[in-house]
Image: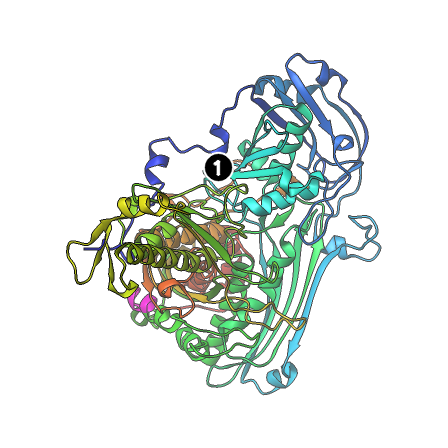
Amino acid sequence: MAPVTLGQDQAQVNALAKVTGRALYAGDLKLPGLLHGKVLRSPYPHARIVRVNTRAALALPGVRAVLTGADCPDALWGVHHKERRILARDVVRFAGEEVAAVAATSEEIARDALDLIEIEYEELPPLLTPEAALASGAPGIHPGRDNVSHRIQFEYGDVDAGFAGAAVVHEATYTTHAQYPGYLEPMATVAQLDAEGRLQVWASTQSVFQARARLASALQMPASRIRVIQATTGGGFGGKLIEDANTLVCALLALKAGGPVRLVNNRLEDFLAACSSVPERITLKMGLSAEGLIVAKDVRIVADCGAYSGLSAEVMHVSAMRSDNMHRNANVRSHATLVYTHTPPHGAFRGFGGTQMQFALNSHLDVLAGMLGMDPLVVHQRNAIAAGETSLHGWHIGSTGLQDCLLQATEAMGWHGKRPGLPARGARRRGVGLACAMHVSGNRTIGNWDGSTVVLKFSEDGRVLIQSGECDMGQGAQTMLSQVVAHELLLPISHVRVAPPDTDVSPYAIGSLASRVTMSAGNAAILAARQARAQMIELAARHWRCEPGQVLFEPGLLRHAQDASRRMSWPELLRLQVWRPGGQELQVSATWDPKTQMHDTALRGNIAPGYSFAAQVVEVEVDTETGRVQVLDSFVSDDCGKAFNPLAIHGQSHGATVQAFGWALYEQLQLEEGCLMNGNFADYTMATAEAVPMLRGGLVESHEPNGPHGAKGASETAILPGAAAIANAVFHATGVRITDLPITPEKVLAGLAALSKSGASHA
């Protein structure tokens, strides 16, 4: 009997290596003659570098290299704009920017060398807010241009006519703040020159090929002279994609020192260097008909990318238009502006711009429902896009479980019993809030390809090695690929192994972003496994001189349908594959690229092969004397298409939920005059186990027609509705509408005081 590998709880295939300490993270790697790298960072958000003196540092015994901006290639690096140097030269643009780096025989010597580097700065006035950067006469943060990094503008339908015919119209401004990725493992890289003089890099990364391309561009080297290998990666959440400078600095140190270098951020350095999520100010105006249907939507966004744009433009793109595709609405106008400031750079973060807009949108729909005297659930149900429909931006919705998610979450939380009832009088008041969201499973926006290639290599003992360039950073990519291949080949999952992504041997891959790996790599794995299965059947048929249709493929063996004596185990067959005239090892390769489209200049085009949905209901208790908000209960319903591994998906959903709680209630990067004041886990308050209730959630299997066995992405959607659900619950409990995240006790108390002063009540 074939083992069941899909739809059952499955421990991560790399879990044992991690819990036993055998997994090697970049910070664990040791090479002969390993040097230790350290980075000196700017203490100022904006300053001119007047003078640099490294002589004392170079003279320190044990120091092998000291680098400044003058030692770096002239090439600039970046994503949307090439605008950043590996080490700052002439000017620094944020407090924490990399100014100098050293490599030494010990960490202690490297730290001492940093202290010996003399840098004279001339402080310059910083522009710390988008308002200051956009002000008339504000100097350009980057030479030769104003402080607008990117703009997005589009309009569909007749928005003004839609508002004119609306039964209710509401306009409000929402502000969202930056969130640090908070992964367990800070950024880390090991780099060396191999025996051939090629640059070899082990990195904590979400994409080995994107990392290689960035190294080649910034170091002005041919990509073929660079090899990038993914070390075990302890979380990414978007922060380990292509925006950190750690890998670039480490590689340059290795080139200059001529020996292997390890560069590991400490936690403060990681807070300073890692891209946090993009802060946005969203002004949203929407109109609903008397039946609760959305008839017009106007969005204005001002987003802050910090000193360098990175992926912020792409993040803002998502905020500006993705939520349009959740609903049926022909009248939409959007204008978004991305602004440079002298603050640490922002960029990719789990949810990738969806969290910001979903906070505003779901809060707004809650208000509009109240204006109509309608249950917010009904508003969501009436506007939800359905399977088979095409959205305003041309997205073809092959599957959606949004209606089922709404039903599952509200029933689990007793919505209909709790929502109509009046909040309890007294100091502690309870309320429930609802929000929902959508996300992509793939994204044809980087370039005109969103595919993945999987190679299967079969050993003589019948085991299978999977080679893929898609990275596992804790979300379970290795386990998913193992499950799919084991399922197709009727193998126990223990007979399948996934090789670490390696640009020298792995097939090209975009990497782990946009919840695309299950969709693209999963489909490629199916094609590769079926190709291997067909080749094995063909080989057995030639050996037995029969038709392939007479060969039965069974767990661990092949046999003739009519002749019981003709049977061959996998090891026998695989040896036969090699030891014959013209023989070779059984190895297959398959590529799957979805039939999607890059969006046009009007932002129309079906960019993803599948779209995921989620709904969340939370219950909170608000202490009206202290302003403290406590989440008492939460239920997230996640539409994942087909749940390959329910255990893993629940883990992803719960992790996303806690990150959403942290963003909504606790986390905030505190900057004073542009300098980070809470770059550690003691002062940067993340949600702990004590701060969250027993997490609950459910899965909706909507079966995506383009997905592998009906599956689609399940790593990001669950983070999107949390902040709005909490804000809506706080309003239900107290009548205080918080539009400025995070929801702090001070803001709740201020809102209660304003209600009391106005004479309004929320009984």
Q: What is the quadrant of residue 110 in the picture?
A: top right
Q: Nearer the viewer, residue 666 or 591?
A: 591
Where are the magenta residues, as a range? 408-414
Magenta: main secondary structure: helix
Q: Quadrant of the N terminus?
A: bottom left
- Horizontal arrangement in the rendering, residue 188 relative to residue 708 (left or right): right
What is the residue that sits farthest to the left in this orientation?
Answer: 564
- Horizontal arrangement in the rendering, residue 491 relative to residue 135 (left or right): left
Whether residue 718 is situated above or below residue 64 in the rendered picture: below
Q: Is residue 676 visible?
A: no
The residue that appears at 41% across and 71% down in the rendered structure is 400
**Where is residue 106 drawn, in percent x and y?**
57, 18
Whether residue 504 is situated above or below residue 759 in the rendered picture: above
Q: Nearer the viewer, residue 208 or 286?
A: 208
Whether residue 326 is situated above or below residue 479 in the rendered picture: below
Q: What is the quadrant of residue 220 in the picture?
A: top right
Q: Nearer the viewer, residue 395 or 743?
A: 395
User: According to the image, label 1 marks what residue?
Assistant: 231
The type of residue carrying mark 1 is Ala
Whether residue 409 is situated above or below residue 97 in the rendered picture: below
The residue that appears at 56% across and 19% down in the rendered structure is 33
Whether residue 412 is in magenta: the answer is yes
Q: Is residue 699 visible?
A: yes
**Where is residue 516 drawn, in percent x and y?**
48, 58
**Where is residue 763 drawn, in percent x and y?**
40, 68
Whether residue 321 is in magenta: the answer is no
